[in-house]
Each structure stands twice: as C-alpha cells, then as structure tokens.
Amino acid sequence: MAYMDVKPTKANGEAVILFHGKNFNGFYWKDVIPFLTEAGYRVIVPDQIGWGKSSKPNIHYSFFMLANNNARLLDSLGINKVIVIAHSMGGMLATRFALMFPERVTKLILENPIGLEDYSQFIPYQTLETLSQKESKATYESIKKYQQTYYPVWKEEYEPYVQAQSAQLKEPDFPQIAFVNALTYQMIYEQPVVHSFDSVRVPTLLIIGQADRTVVGKDQLNEQQKKVYGNYPLLGRRTNARIKNSKLVELPGVGHIPHIQSFPLFKQHVLNFLQSKN
C-alpha cells in the first residue's frame, strides 16, 4: 500500500488522511496537501489497494477491507485519531471507516461523495466479464470524455488529471488493472453505504458542487432516468438531514471535484470546519 506522509513545519498535533475517488489516486490532492500542512496538520495520502502506486491484486474488494487497511496504516504510523477528508468513491470508504472506527475519527469531510443513492436499485446488474471487457477497451480519449463530465466547463488545466488516470494504459499489466477496475466497480454497486448514514455520529461537513450529476453506471440509464438520478443538490440535502451532526455547504456552478474546480472556496470551507469547535 503506497502512501505519502507529509509533515507540517509547525505541527498542531492533528493528522488528516485523504481518501481519493475511483478514477484518481493521491496525485490529485497536490494542491490540498500544502494548505493543510501550512495549517499545522500531518497529512497521510494513501493510494488504496487496487489504485495508483499500490498493488492491484485479484481479490474480493470491499469497503470493509479498505477501511481496515487504512486503520492498519495509521497504526503503523502511530496515529490514533484522524480527520478524514474524502472525495467521490472515497466518501463511501470514509463513511464505512467512520462506522467501523468511530473512536478514531474526530471530523469527517465528504466532498461530492458518490453512493448518496443506492445504484443497485436503478442501475441494471452487469457481470464481471462485461465490466472487465469495458474497462479493457479504455483509451485516452474515453478517459478524457468521462472526466469532462466532472466540470460544467472544461479547461486545459484539468488535462493533467486525465494524464494521471490514463497512465495505467501504458502499464505492462494493464489487463490486470482493467480487471481490478471492474472488481472495484462491482464493490461500489454491491456495497451501498447510503442506508447507514443514520448511524454516523462523527461531526461531518458535506461539500457539494451543485452542478454535479455523477451516477456510477450512468451509461446504463435512459434519458428520463438521467434527469432523475445523480441529483446532487437534492442528494446533499437528504444526506445532511440523515447525518445528525452534519453541516452542508452548497457550491453553485461547481461540478464533481470542488477541490480542483473551485479550490479557494474548498480551502476556505475546509479550514473553517477544521478550526471550528464542533
């Protein structure tokens, strides 16, 4: 399990762990890490098993396993309590982590998490063989086309994140990577966390870009369904109502990745929440 452990110049005694999304790895936190360390936080940035620089074994992937991996990582670093900041699929992992280890999580920040609805209730089931075939056909162009859906307006400054994801295409073990990508798609589909939000007790900040319409498996929906599901303004408010000790920040005109598209606002809301008393 690859990770970065970035120490602050002047430590405040607190640590933050960053959980990436499905189509990302630790690289896309590159602007987030410095403002956290400047504020005194020790920042742990793992690539989850199955992603980035970490190994990609052919195993049963579960959010329980990934959460346990991160707890063991923190144990190895002597970190008992942690703030969790999570984006997209990382939000599903962070929810499971907070449920499994509530005594370790002091605060939770969920940035446009997926899994705010149960995809298995409206996305048709796809076999692992079908998913694996789809993943094996990925190209730079298909990856870019998908990432373009993350933003209301595409800018060339977003290109490095396409390059980071598409680097896997050049790996000699890409067939194995594609298979793991299919396995982790199934993990998201088969292991919803939305039904557990009522049990989250950790002080939580929801940062929701209001222009986001991400749905895992969206290509399986008809045009009418696409208007119904992935409604992040509605999903954010529903989740805020269900997580008892939570605060909702809505960002108009912002898509799936606020920390890239609207970095100054993201930074402001994160620091305000981290430095608040609740």
Image: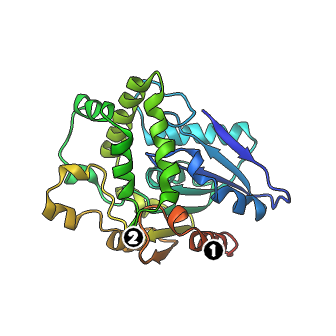
State the residue position of label 2: 236
Q: In this view, does 30 lie above or below 189?
A: below
Is residue 201 at all visible to an observer of this figure? no
Disc 2 residue crowd, few under 14, some 14–19, many 20+, Cα 10 Å: many
Residue found at x 21% / y 38%: 126
Q: Is residue 154 above or below residue 72?
A: below
Disc 1 residue crowd, few under 14, some 14–19, many 20+, Cα 10 Å: few
Whether the residues at callouts 1 and 2 have beta carbons within 8 Å, the answer is: no
Q: Where is residue 100 in the image (x, y as percent from the top left)?
A: 52, 48
- Under mark 2, the amino acid is Gly
Taking depth in this image into account, of 253 and 16 the one nearest to the observer is 253
Q: Quadrant where the C terminus lies?
A: bottom right
Taking depth in this image into account, of 243 and 180 the one nearest to the observer is 180
Q: Nearer the viewer, mark 1 or mark 2?
A: 1
Is residue 269 at all visible to an observer of this figure? yes
State the residue position of label 1: 268
Q: Quadrant where the N terminus lies?
A: top right
